[in-house]
């Protein structure tokens, strides 16, 4: 014998189903996780303490997720700004620092060691060496962390972007995976 459901019961079931889907699918405030296959396991916005961001001259309140400009969909990105600089940090689980050499849009590669950690320094193709620089580090699990610094040109200070990024990375390297 088949039970009949009332119209009200059907509406309630549909509303509950929609509510469950909305709760499960609208977690925009949280970063994707590696377990879901939607992103890397390390999130720079969540893992780098505000105190460290302040220590390198950036404003912790300026934090923004840079997913839209990350190198690809399997990357998590975060950025912060200061008076004359902007830093972006990207993380991916399945790329090594050596992969940056094969990525389009980068040149002028150099093997570097920052705070005891081996990495690759590079410049974006369109970048002026005084205003843009990038560093890539391989994680212990074979992933990649990229740091990118953009500097507002100031003839009075004229410190090259890579020098500033190296000083910034020396502070941040201890918390990078």
Image (cartoon, rainbow, N blue to C red):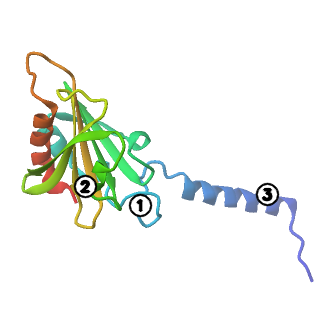
The percent coordinates of residue 13 (x first, y second) are: 74, 62
The percent coordinates of residue 172 (x first, y second) are: 15, 48
The percent coordinates of residue 145 (x first, y second) are: 26, 53
Residue 11, numbered circle:
3
User: How much space separates mark 2 and mark 3, taking CA atoms?
Assistant: 53 Å
Say if 126 sits above or below 9 in the image. Answer: above
Q: Quadrant of residue 175?
A: bottom left
Q: On the picture, is 28 further left or further right than 105?
A: right
Q: Residue furthest bottom?
A: 1
Residue at image point 26% right, 40% down: 107
Say if 76 sits above or below 138 in the image. Answer: above
Q: Residues within 10 Å of mark 2 (few under 14, many from 20)?
A: many
Residue at the disc numbered 1: 33
Q: On the picture, is 38 further left or further right than 144?
A: right
Residue at image point 33% right, 50% down: 102
Helix, strand or loop at label 3? It is helix
Residue at image point 25% right, 55% down: 97
Q: Residues within 10 Å of mark 1 (few under 14, many from 20)?
A: some
Q: Quadrant of the N terminus?
A: bottom right
Q: Are marks 2 and 3 in contact (CB under 8 Å)?
A: no
Question: Is residue 6 or residue 50 the one in the foreground?
Answer: 50
Residue 109 appears in the rendering = yes
Viewer-side label of 1, 2: 2
Dot 2 or dot 3: first in sequence order is 3
User: How much space separates mark 1 and mark 3, taking CA atoms?
Assistant: 34 Å
Residue 97, numbered circle:
2
Residue at image point 23% right, 26% down: 128
């Amino acid at each position: 014998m088949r039970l009949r459901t009332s119209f009200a019961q059907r509406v309630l079931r549909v509303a509950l189903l929609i509510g469950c889907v909305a709760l499960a699918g609208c977690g925009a405030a949280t970063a994707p996780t590696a377990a879901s296959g939607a992103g890397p396991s390390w999130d720079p916005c969540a893992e780098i303490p505000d105190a460290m961001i302040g220590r390198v001259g950036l404003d912790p309140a300026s934090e923004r997720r840079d997913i839209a400009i990350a190198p690809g969909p399997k990357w998590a990105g975060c950025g912060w700004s200061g008076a004359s600089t902007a830093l972006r940090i990207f993380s991916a689980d399945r790329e090594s620092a050596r992969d940056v050499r094969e990525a389009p849009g980068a040149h002028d590669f150099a093997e570097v060691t920052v705070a005891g950690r081996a990495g690759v320094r590079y410049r974006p193709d369109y970048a002026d060496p005084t205003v843009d620089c990038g560093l890539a580090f391989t994680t212990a699990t074979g992933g990649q962390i990229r740091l990118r610094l953009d500097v507002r040109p100031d003839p009075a200070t004229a410190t090259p972007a890579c020098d500033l990024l190296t000083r910034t990375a020396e502070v941040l390297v201890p918390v990078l995976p």
